[in-house]
Image (cartoon, helix red, strand yellow):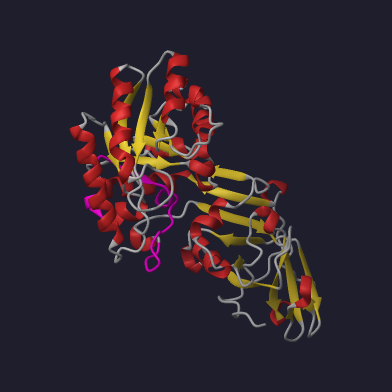
Amino acid sequence: MTYPAATGDLPPVSGAVRPPSYERSAVIDLEAIRHNVRRLAAAASPAQVMAVVKADAYGHGAVPVARAALEAGAGWLGVAHISEALALRAAGIEAPMLAWLHTAESNFGAAVAAGVDIGCSGWELERIVAAAREQERPARVHLKVDTGLGRNGATIDVWDSLVGEAMEYQDEGLLRVVGIFSHLAVADEPERPETDDQLAAFREVLAIAEDAGVDPEVRHLANTPATLSRPDTHFDLVRVGLGIYGLSPFEGQTSAELGLRPAMTVRTVVAHCKDVPDGQGVSYGLNYHTHGASTLGLIPLGYADGVPRVATGGPVRVEGVTYPVVGRIAMDQMVIDLGARHVSAGGHSLLGAEAELFGDGADGGPTADDWARAAGTINYEIVTRISPRVPRTFINEKPAP
């Protein structure tokens, strides 16, 4: 098995050892978050922006990211689970927020008590009403319709009856229908016609709701790719997730081309260096062997840290040079082949040097997109799967003056 050659000019070897707190870290640039929110808000205007901070803000840290997004002009926060919304409330965040993915065990009462808006596809309605009665407080509900994605959301066939039932409860003072929404299936492929079909269906269900007396505060359909490419889908509010983290949703466009800045940098230090002979096997299965005398560098991150096991060939940048991972990625570690030029001469070594897996791509450095290609997946998965074993470090916590 062969891999691409290392790229970049080889710098002098420093061997500098970092402090223990630097061993492994995911560094989150909150000013990049603010920049991205401002960029997306400009694209969405006059629609408002909902910053989607589900899944611990795509692995970036929900509370710090939520605060940064609000500072930059986001008017809403979005999460999947009620528990995620309650954690934001517990942190003192009072902004409007919506939770939309529920089970029969979801704590609707806590959501109503905390003033969290609740997405409703139909089956939840009775449970939401029961929670409102218990809390003696009307629930704030966003009715969701399935316009073609085929996940949650009421079907078009039952939409009329759902709206009618919700309005009966609204007349009783048990809830307020404050939103109507749906979700796009292929907005990241702008040439596909299904987005037009979904938009047409959404307009139809809005008309049905309006005829039934619904006067929503917000109608929302657009995700990040639609925010950037389909202004006709913006309505009153756009829900942006991937974009606020500085990643591109489009196959043919980079973050930089979209005016976005990746916010997460994952880095560690080289944990071990050793000179090996020609033909040395590397890692489980011995699927890789060195081509001549070489130096191997051990990188102390693996699939337990969220690095995809299948991403052999993923890039690691050490002192300005990008090397591919060789051999299988293990639970806690992986290996890069530093080449013949690092075979010990006078005791020089890259032991302790910074090793960056991905960051903002400046100066040709590796990106989450590079790792996605190596793993045969998408950039969303790369950032969200970085595990809690990798400590998050936040920089630029205060907005720039």
Q: Is 334 placed left or right of 115 in the picture?
A: right
Looking at the rendering, the stretch of residues picked out in magenta corresponds to 229-254
Q: Position of residue 372 (x, y in %)?
A: 53, 64
Q: Look at the image and say whether residue 390 sits in the magenta stretch.
A: no
For residue 248, what is the image quadrant?
bottom left
For the point 22% across and 45% down, the residue is 204
Query: Residue 253: which quarter of the image?
Result: bottom left
For the point 54% across and 68% down, the residue is 376
Q: Is any part of residue 392 visible from this angle?
A: yes
Q: Position of residue 115 (x, y in %)?
A: 42, 23
Depth check: 323 or 306 in front?
A: 306
Against 9, residue 215 (above or below) is: above
Total numbered labels placed on residues in the image: 0
Relative side of 319 to 339, left or right: left
Q: Quadrant of the N terminus?
A: bottom right
In the rendered view, would you say 298 is above or below 151? below
250 is within the stretch colored magenta: yes
